[in-house]
Image (cartoon, rainbow, N blue to C red):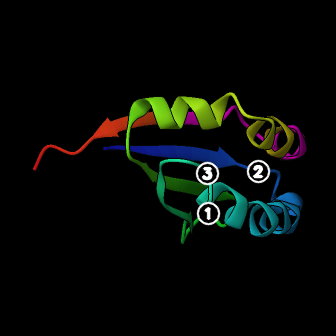
Amino acid sequence: MVNRLVKLTFQPDKTDAFLTIFEGSRPLIRAAEGCLYLEALREVDAPHIFFTHSRWESKEDLERYRQSELFRSTWAKTKPLFAAKAEAWTLEEQI
């Protein structure tokens, strides 16, 4: 199992647009093969910064999603809203 954390820093006036995109994409991403969990978290002291956290059965499932049309189309709508480059980590549980 792997966890994917992605830090997304948006232009402050674009956060509502991101939330709309995420709400529309969330059920589709959750239905992707191997996706076990998905949530968006918002930074309390910087409300234009979000983290997405997803859990996948395998690194291969995550990579298959990242190569999908769903990912490409969602990313194409999300990327223009950024104020900074996204950062991502793929993590394995240790304990």
Q: Residue at x 65, y 55 (%)?
A: 29
**Secondary structure state at the residue bearing disc 1:** loop
Tag 2: amino acid? Phe
Q: Residue at x 56, y 34 (%)?
A: 87
- The image quarter containing residue 67 is top right
Tag 1: amino acid? Ala
Label 3: few (<14), some (14–19) or many (≥20) C-alpha neighbours in 10 Å: some
Count of residue discs: 3
Numbered circle sitting on residue 19: none
User: What percent of the width, then of the height, locates residue 48?
Assistant: 71, 60
What quarter of the picture does the N terminus occupy?
Answer: top left
Name the residue beneath numbered marker 1: 46
Residue at the extreme front of the image, as rendered: 33
Q: Between tags 1 and 3, which lies in front?
A: 3
Q: Between tags 1 and 2, which lies in front?
A: 2
User: What percent of the width, then of the height, locates residue 42?
Assistant: 58, 67
Q: Report if residue 4 is visible in the image.
A: yes
User: What percent of the width, then of the height, locates residue 81?
Assistant: 86, 47
Name the residue beneath numbered marker 3: 32
Label 2: few (<14), some (14–19) or many (≥20) C-alpha neighbours in 10 Å: many
Name the residue beneath numbered marker 2: 10
> Which residue occupies the foreground of this view, 63 or 12?
63
**Secondary structure state at the residue bearing disc 3:** loop
Tag 3: amino acid? Ala
The reply to whether dot 1 and dot 2 touch (C-beta < 8 Å) is no
- The image quarter containing residue 12 is bottom right
Residue at the extreme left of the image, as rendered: 95
Write down the region rendered in magenta: 76-87
Residue 85 highlighted magenta (yes or no): yes
